[in-house]
Image (tube, rainbow, N blue to C red):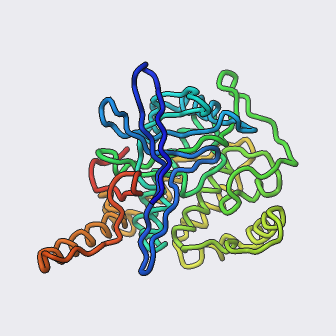
């Protein structure tokens, strides 16, 4: 597996960080697939080792010759958000040789990685436990006067170590301040805006060119939850000659798919969530507690235990048990389980551990 290696000198003076491009090894029945993990809206993310203490960190790199540099802006947003539950800790930002560099805590796999690991379907228990944390993360960003504008499974990562059950929200390259932090004045309503974010999860108003606000982050989350429930969304896989035409097709399909049809076969709380978020006014504050309570009450009604045992926790435990049995039964044979090991460097699956907030 080919790797790109870099040596970066960071503050404090004399500290070296040795970085390798991160590739996730996926096993299938016949071949192995390698790909980067942690590519953000702008720049690539590398897993890194501080050679002075052996600690692993994540480094986001952006060429300082980029036509539209974003990493400095993203680092400033992270600084404003520091201290929030589920917000990565920023270690350092600066310029090193031909790169703008952002150093932050290393995290685990994304929800998209874990969704694939779980054969692209989550149980209702896992979806509801995730929904509770996801609403909380978005609410915190909104409280800090920003909207994310790219809510998707790839931008939610599980922690590692003692934070392995805590969900983190990342990638603030597209985030925007929606109100003045001093006067609390909301940004004005505008139209004819280009689509910002990922079309699959974009709100209908974002497709229509309307300036995004808090309601759009919340609507996007509704599509993420239904993606986890269904495995796919009705507007996936549409073909078009150009990106513009594809976005138009996605928009048309999204607008003509009723909430009831999208959520058919799933609890009423999901169409209730989407109907509520779609009905919010441009400058209206979502009732985050109402939305969390929708799913918390459903969780209790279904008699689930809030034990933070996610679908991937169960799968990994079963795979490890099977491997243990195979090894004990045939000591000379080593079978590959196909289960990612812990840590973001290999797209790891977190172990069960401390309860997150």
Residue placed most toward the observer, 122 or 172 = 172
Residue at x-position 68% and y-position 27%: 184
Q: Position of residue 64 (x, y in %)?
A: 66, 33
| Position above or below: 168 against 260 | above
Task: Give the total number of marks visible in the rendering.
Answer: 0
Residue placed most toward the observer, 229 or 92 = 92
Q: Quadrant of residue 80?
A: top right
Tell me the quadrant of the picture where the N terminus can be found.
bottom left
The reply, left or right, for residue 27 in relation to residue 55 is right
| Position above or below: 65 against 10 | below
Tell me the quadrant of the picture where the C terminus can be found.
top left
Q: Position of residue 318 (x, y in %)?
A: 26, 72
The reply, left or right, for residue 32 in relation to residue 236 is left
| Position above or below: 214 against 30 | above
Q: Position of residue 116 (x, y in %)?
A: 47, 68
The reply, left or right, for residue 345 in relation to residue 4 is left
Q: Position of residue 169 (x, y in %)?
A: 51, 46
Please identify the residue farthest to the top as the structure is shown: 13
Please identify the residue farthest to the right as the structure is shown: 192
Residue at x-position 73% and y-position 29%: 185
Residue at x-position 74% and y-position 38%: 68
| Position above or below: 3 against 251 | above
The reply, left or right, for residue 21 in relation to residue 206 is left
């Amino acid at each position: 597996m080919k790797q790109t290696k870099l040596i970066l000198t960071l503050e404090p003076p004399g500290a070296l960080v040795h970085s390798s491009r991160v590739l996730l090894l996926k096993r299938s029945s016949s071949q192995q697939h390698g790909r980067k993990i942690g590519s953000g809206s702008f720049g690539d993310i590398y897993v890194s080792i501080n050679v002075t203490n052996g600690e692993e960190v994540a480094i986001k790199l952006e060429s300082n010759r980029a036509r539209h540099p974003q990493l400095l802006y993203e680092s400033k947003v992270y600084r404003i958000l520091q201290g929030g539950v589920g917000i990565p800790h920023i270690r350092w930002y600066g310029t090193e040789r031909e790169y703008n560099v952002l150093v932050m805590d290393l995290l685990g796999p994304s929800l998209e990685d874990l969704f694939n690991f779980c054969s692209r379907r989550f149980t209702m228990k896992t979806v509801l436990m995730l929904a509770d944390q996801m609403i909380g993360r978005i609410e915190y960003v909104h409280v800090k006067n920003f909207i994310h504008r790219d809510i998707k499974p790839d931008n939610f990562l599980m922690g590692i170590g003692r934070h392995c059950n805590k969900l983190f929200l990342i990638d603030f390259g597209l985030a925007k301040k929606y109100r003045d932090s001093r006067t609390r004045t909301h940004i004005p309503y505008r139209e004819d805006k280009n689509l910002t974010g990922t079309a699959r999860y974009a709100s209908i108003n974002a497709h229509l060119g309307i300036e995004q606000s808090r309601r759009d982050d919340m609507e996007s989350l509704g599509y993420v939850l239904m993606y986890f429930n269904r495995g796919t969304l009705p507007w996936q896989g549409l073909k078009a000659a150009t990106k513009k035409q594809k976005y138009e097709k996605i928009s048309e399909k999204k607008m003509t798919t009723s909430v009831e049809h999208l959520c058919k076969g799933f609890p009423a709380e999901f169409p209730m969530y989407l109907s509520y978020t779609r009905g919010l006014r441009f400058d209206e504050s979502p009732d985050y507690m109402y939305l969390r309570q929708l799913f918390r009450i459903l969780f209790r009604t279904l008699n689930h235990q809030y034990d933070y045992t996610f679908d991937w926790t169960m799968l990994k435990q079963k795979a490890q048990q099977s491997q243990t049995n195979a090894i004990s039964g045939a000591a000379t044979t080593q079978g590959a389980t196909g289960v990612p090991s812990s840590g973001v460097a290999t797209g790891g699956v977190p172990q069960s551990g401390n309860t997150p907030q």
